[in-house]
Image: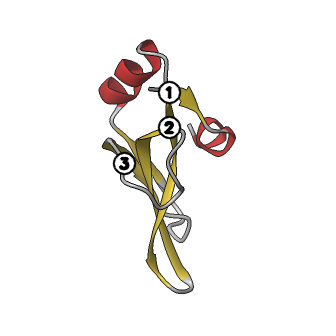
Amino acid sequence: MAVSIRLHRCGMKNQPHFRIVAIDSRKAAKGKFIEVIGSYDPRKKDNKVTVNKERLEYWKKNGARLSETVSHLI
């Protein structure tokens, strides 16, 4: 199973909020994810990104690939 770490959009219309999730790379963007690693709120001015660094390192160690957007955020 190829795992990727990418953004999963949630929130209402015109009020985006994103979760940083570990997901099977073959699943759809709105598909079922394995684990929530963090969150990203583009509407906040300070501390937009929160990440559980231990879980992020765990997934990276086991071969998960970061999406381009997530790698820029972290």
Instruction: Calculate the distance from the C-alpha at mark 2 to the C-alpha at mark 1.
Output: 10 Å
**Residue at position x 62%, y 35% in the image:** 71
Q: Do labels 3 and 1 touch, CB within 8 Å? A: no
Residue 5: mark in rendering? 2
Position of the N terminus, as image quadrant, is: top left
What amino acid is labelled 2 in the image?
A: Ile
**Tag 3 residue:** 33
Q: State the SS at label 2.
A: strand
Question: In terms of sequence position, does the residue under pointer 3 or pointer 2 come before the other?
Answer: 2
What amino acid is labelled 3 in the image?
A: Phe
**Tag 1 residue:** 2
Which tag is nearer the camera, tag 2 or tag 1?
1
Q: Do labels 2 and 1 touch, CB within 8 Å? A: no
Q: Nearer the viewer, residue 54 or 4?
A: 4
The answer to which quarter of the image holds residue 34 is top left
Q: Residues within 10 Å of mark 2 (few under 14, many from 20)?
A: many
Q: Nearer the viewer, residue 42 or 3?
A: 3
Q: Position of residue 54 (x, y in %)?
A: 31, 24
Question: In terms of sequence position, does the residue under pointer 3 or pointer 1 come before the other?
Answer: 1
